[in-house]
Structures are given as structure tokens and as C-alpha cells.
Amino acid sequence: MGTNEKDDTLTNRQGHPITNNQSIRTVGNRGPATLENYDFIEKISHFDRERVPERVVHARGAGAHGYFEAYGTAGDEPISKYTRAKLFQEKGKKTPVFVRFSSVIHGGHSPETLRDPRGFAVKFYTEDGNWDLVGNNLKIFFIRDAMKFPDMIHAFKPDPITNIQDSERFFDFCASSPETLHMVTFVYSPWGIPANYRQMQGSGVNTYKWVNSEGEGVLVKYHWEPKQGIKNLTQKEAEEIQGKNFNHATQDLYEAIEREDYPEWELFVQIMSDDEHPELDFDPLDDTKLWPKEQFPWLPVGKMVLDRNPEDYFTEVEQAAFGTGVLVDGLDFSDDKMLQGRTFSYSDTQRHRVGANYLQLPINAPKKRVATNQSGGQMQYKVDRAPGQNPHINYEPSILGGLKETKQEGKEHTPHIEGNKVRQKIDRENNFGQAGQTYREFEDWERDELISNLVNDLKNCHKDIQSKMLEMFYECDNDYGKRVEEGLKNAHVDADDTSGPLGESQTRQAVNKAEEEG
Ligand code: HEM
């Protein structure tokens, strides 16, 4: 330390003490400034780079640290019957976790009261390396083929010209994608606005596999159940909160942890044998479907407690990178093609969003040794070298030394797959059956909300979109279709009326213009 330097002395990143942080260096006190203002240029140019691209979806989020504690069992069975993943084996075994909750469609500081699924992404720092369970609050999804994801997100995000979200674009996509109806039914009900992050469920949504030490696989779905109970909002309640506080969910999570009221979730799994299950009226790999609880009971396997807030939002929450490809021994992919599409997308976007060395950041790095032959790329700040490793041998295999492969623990899971390469929809689409059942299982106030929210957003849509949506609501359940139809009639707004709250949407104007021009 220099003579006048103390522990709290401000420095730049070269370690130079700063003697004047108020004024840039100028010719006379009125300027002009000079180019050799190193401290100013370092300060301002770092500021200019303070943001990385926000997530293309799920940009708005909040995070917390905690732990997962295993029960050692899956219901009445020892868990080793189904999986050899080490984090689950012993009763009471704790694994550190980092969780990020999010909303999906709007940007980094958008209101947390919007109707939207909520992300529920968990990173388990296990002794075998990291496992990410990248889930949502709702248990199903809009689509079942990854090819449709970019179009779906384009339709749901703000219009490319006006930058305003437009329900006509949302329903335009859904009207031609009947597999969305089950998710639309949830999202337009109060389940589309969880009261906060602590009082919502989580789900892995896609079907994964568990593999035991014999190499035998089963299909598995994951569910997080909040010990705080579940609470959802009506549209009106959400609007009231939003009028006063658009950060309420982040604040609720942060403050609960600060006052040591640690939120907890229990983890349940549903298990199915690993085959196509022709006896079911849905495909077990179809993420628009629930697995009926009566047939596939929820088996408790552990609990998660969040007990520590991040020290720095950007370092931990913003730079956190979760992906569905991040599995440990004993966990595996199913053949779910949507899951495989996701698995490419996450690490691809993270190399762009955070950088090639995103896995070296402390929030993303495993809490165990890492030894690779990877090196270079922007922002590398260390080499993943094993202790005593000869630094010249940065390749494998080698007779001279270097890193070596290890043996597989337990038998490999080697499912047999054959078929023609095709581009096709799945056979058992059954797009409306479960949507109708969900509609019937809602409580009365949930159904009332669903109808009123749908009518409110559909009433300004093009008549062809309205009729296609109505046709599908009727397919789900006659009462469902009837109530939306009546609601639209009572709204006194037909397709040619442009008296909606925002007038005619930009999308509609463009469609009308194109129609006029033939
Ligand atoms: C975030 C792609 C479906 C849950 C993301 C991100 C991408 C993406 C690119 C941004 C990641 C980042 O910048 O770090 C996709 C694709 C999907 C898909 C291509 C379908 C083919 C789903 C589904 C779920 C889901 C079905 C629910 C299980 C999430 C969550 C995040 C996320 C929770 C935020 C993770 C975080 O907090 O950082 N997704 N997604 N996504 N996705 Fe998906």
C-alpha cells in the first residue's frame, strides 16, 4: 500500500489509489478535457459495458442460495431402485443449490405481476458436478416441438414495430397451434399470475429418465411443492399490486430470506416404465400433458430450503446459466424431442450472452475439481489443470501423462432405438382432452377469471382468430366454449369494431391493409 493508502482507499483496477474521483483532468477548470485521463476513461468505459445481453426469454428474475436435502427414498422404495444419482441416496444428505425464478416474455425490469409462466430453475452443486433442473411453475407447456419455439416467442413478445405486446398476435399463433390449448387454459386462469415466487409450484415439465446401477432406466417427471402453500392472483388483484410495486415478487423473496423465514419446497417425482405406453391416451413424452396423479403417484424424494440472498445481483443472478443438458450420473435424457431442442439452445445462448468461459464463473462452476484440456477464449482467467498435471500435456490420450478418462460407475444405460428419420407430429396429440379436464377441475372463481381474462383479450382479435379459438374451446368442453362465446357477444365488440382499449392494433392495421391490397 502507498504511504497514504488505507483499507478503504478507492483504487482503479490497476491498483492505483484514486486521489480525485470528482473531476476529470482539463486545460483550465472549464475544459477542454485531455485524452490521457486514464482513470476517467477506465471508469466510463467500464460503465459503458456494464450490461450483457439480457436473456432472450426469462429476462426478469430473482435468485437465492440454499440446499437440497435428500430423503433417500422415493415414496416407500429405496431411491436406488430407480436412480444411482448420488445426491438422492442418503437420508439427510445436503447438496448446495442456487435457484433463479423468473417471468418469461418481457424485459429485465418488467412488472412481476404480468400474466406469464414463471421460471423455476435450480442448479444443484453435487459431488458429481452440477445438475440443472430448468423448470417452470406450471406443469405443462404451450408446444411440444422445439422447431416452433422461436415463432411462439416472437408472437408472444412485443410487436416488432410498435414494441407493444398484442394479444391478437398471441392468439393468432395459438389458433393455428391446437396443442397450446391446455397451457392457454392455465395461463389465462389465476394460475397465470402466481402471487409471488415463494407461493408457487415448480415442475421440470419435460420428461427425463432415471438410471439405476444396473443401467435400467425409468421415465421421470419432477414437481416442486411449496411448503408456504400456493397462492394465485385475480387480474384485479395483480393490477392493484402493479399500481404500487412492480418488483413485489423479488422483494417478497429477498425480505423473507433476510428475516430468516426461509422458503421451502418438497421435491416429488412421478415414475413410469420406459416405453411408449400405448394404453394411455397421451404420449408420456408430450410436455403439453399432465401425468394423472392417481395412476402415477407423486413420490417425495427430498426438500429444498432457500436461506441466503445473493451478495451481488449481476454476478450471481444475471450471470447464472442453467441448461437442460446439465445432468449427473444416474439422471438421463428421455427421447422427448422438445427436451433435446432445449438442450442445444441453453448453452448456445449462454456462450453468446455470458461468453465462451461462462462455466468458469463461480456461480456456474461446480463446487468440485474441474480438470479439462479446454483453454482460451474471452475472459478465461484460469486453466482447469489438475494438481501436479504436466502443463505441456494439454491433450488426451497421451503416453507422457496428462488427464485420463475414468471408468463408468454402474452399468451404462443403452436403450435401443430404431425408426425412419422423419419430420412428423406425434401420433397421440389429444390436444383438448386434458384442457377440458383442467377447465372442469378449476374452482368456480378460477373458471370465472379464466373466461373474463380470455374474453378481454380475445374481443379485439380478428374474427377468424376468434372463431378458431372458440371452435377449440368447444372441443375442450362445451361449457368452456359457450361461456367464451357468450362473453364475446356481451363484449359488443365484433371483428370490425376498433373500439378496444388501445384501438385497432398495429398488427390488425397491417393485416387489413394487406387484405385491402388483395
Ligand atoms: C430460459 C430456450 C422451453 C424454462 C431460456 C433461454 C433460452 C430458452 C434460450 C435463455 C437462457 C439464458 O439466457 O441463460 C428454450 C427453448 C425451449 C424452451 C428453445 C423449447 C424448445 C422451456 C420450457 C421450460 C423452460 C418447456 C419449462 C420447463 C426456462 C427457464 C429459463 C429459460 C426457467 C430461465 C433460466 C434462468 O433463470 O436463467 N429458455 N426454452 N423453457 N427457460 Fe426455456
Image (cartoon, rainbow, N blue to C red):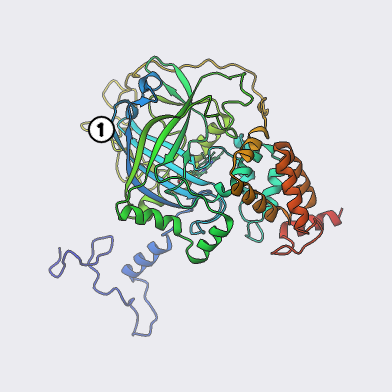
Q: Position of residue 396 (x, y in %)?
A: 34, 25
Residue 9 visible in this rendered orientation of the protein: yes
Say whether residue 311 is visible.
no
In front here: 305 or 328? Answer: 305
Question: Left of 167 or right of it: where is 345?
Answer: left
Residue 447 on image: x %, y %: 63, 46
- Residue situated furthest left in the rendering: 3
Decide: few, some or many residues near mark 1? Use Cα within 10 Å; few <14, some 14-19, many ≥20.
some
Question: Camera-side residue: 285 or 484?
Answer: 484
Q: Nearer the viewer, residue 499 or 125?
A: 499
Question: Quadrant of the image for the N terminus?
Answer: bottom left
What is the tally of numbered marks visible in this picture? 1
Quadrant of the rendered structure where residue 363 is?
A: top left
> How far across and down, in percent of the image, does residue 469 sit?
73, 44
Quadrant of res 251: bottom left
Q: Name above or below for residue 430 compared with residue 177.
A: above
- Residue 216 placed where, x, y %? 44, 16
Label 1 sits on a secondary structure element that is: loop
Depth check, front residue: 122 or 361: 122
Which residue in the structure is indicated by mark 1? 386
- Left-right relation of 105 to 261: right
What is the residue that sits farthest to the front in this orientation?
444
For badge 1, the amino acid type reads: Ala
- Residue 75 falls left or right of residue 147: left
At x 55% / y 18%, what residue is drawn?
275
Q: From what the image shows, is residue 229 above or below residue 106?
A: above
Q: Is residue 496 left or right of residue 260?
A: right
Mark 1 vs ligand 1: CB below 8 Å: no
